[in-house]
Image (cartoon, rainbow, N blue to C red):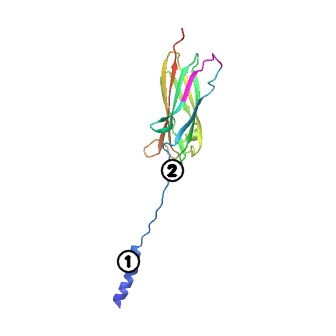
Amino acid sequence: MAVAVGISLIGPAMALWNDELIIWENINTGYLTGNVLFSKVYAEDQTLPPGEGWGTISTRIENEDGKKDHRITIDIVRGKNKTNWVLNSKIENQGSIPVRFLPPTVMADDLLYVEYDLPNKVIDPGKKGLDPGDSVEGQIRIKLNNDVSGTYPFQIEVKCIQWNAYNNDPGWWTDTLHINGTVVVLPPED
């Protein structure tokens, strides 16, 4: 009888050790890369009366490396006495997480002054940034510092990161938008 009691006590203990708990859960982390896009670019006041000297401004949104709408190209042929231009761009967050932008990196010919401004709410660390489905306007300002004929290139990189990232360290979701452009100063007419 002692053996039967001993086996009956071991049985329940063995059953407890063999029980399994399995939890299957899908985790959705969202998506950012390839989903923050330029959707519009246009020049302010580019239609002035004849002889006022705006010149020709050509703007277009292009694909880059298979990524749709990640690059703006701006070509300006300077009109007589024109030394500055203002253009606007629209950026949309088509991803599923909020994003913010790092201060843009500008590379320009020494004879150009170029800057790209975005509202502080999408740049400042600690702020929520640009929510999914929302858009923000940025402003491109270009100033020519001379009258010497030639072609003057510029490039702007706009890095976007997940809203809670504080820098561009590896491990954060990042994406980069590009603005490429040229200002052409024609030789004086004879």
Q: Identify the element where label 1 is drawn.
A: helix
Disc 2/disc 1 C-alpha distance (Å): 43 Å
User: Which of the image's four quarters has the N terminus?
Assistant: bottom left
Say the numbered circle drawn on residue 136: none
Q: Nearer the viewer, residue 141 or 54?
A: 54
What span is colored magenta in the figure?
49-59
The answer, for residue 125, to whether it is visible in the render is no
Residue 163 on image: x %, y %:
53, 45
Residue sitting at the far top: 190
Which residue position holds label 2? Answer: 30
Callout 2 crowding tier (Cα within 10 Å): few <14, some 14–19, many ≥20: few
As shown in the figure, which amino acid type bears the numbered disc 1?
Met
Q: Which residue is mark 1?
A: 14
Residue 91 lies, in percent from the top left, at 56, 38
x and y percentages locating residue 134 in the rendered image: 59, 43
The mark nearer the N terminus, 2 or 1, is 1
Q: Give the residue displayed 50% in from the left and 27% down from the top.
A: 181
- As for residue 74 lying within the magenta part, the answer is no
Task: Tell whether 71 sits left or right of 53.
Answer: left
Residue 184 at x, y percent in the picture = 51, 20
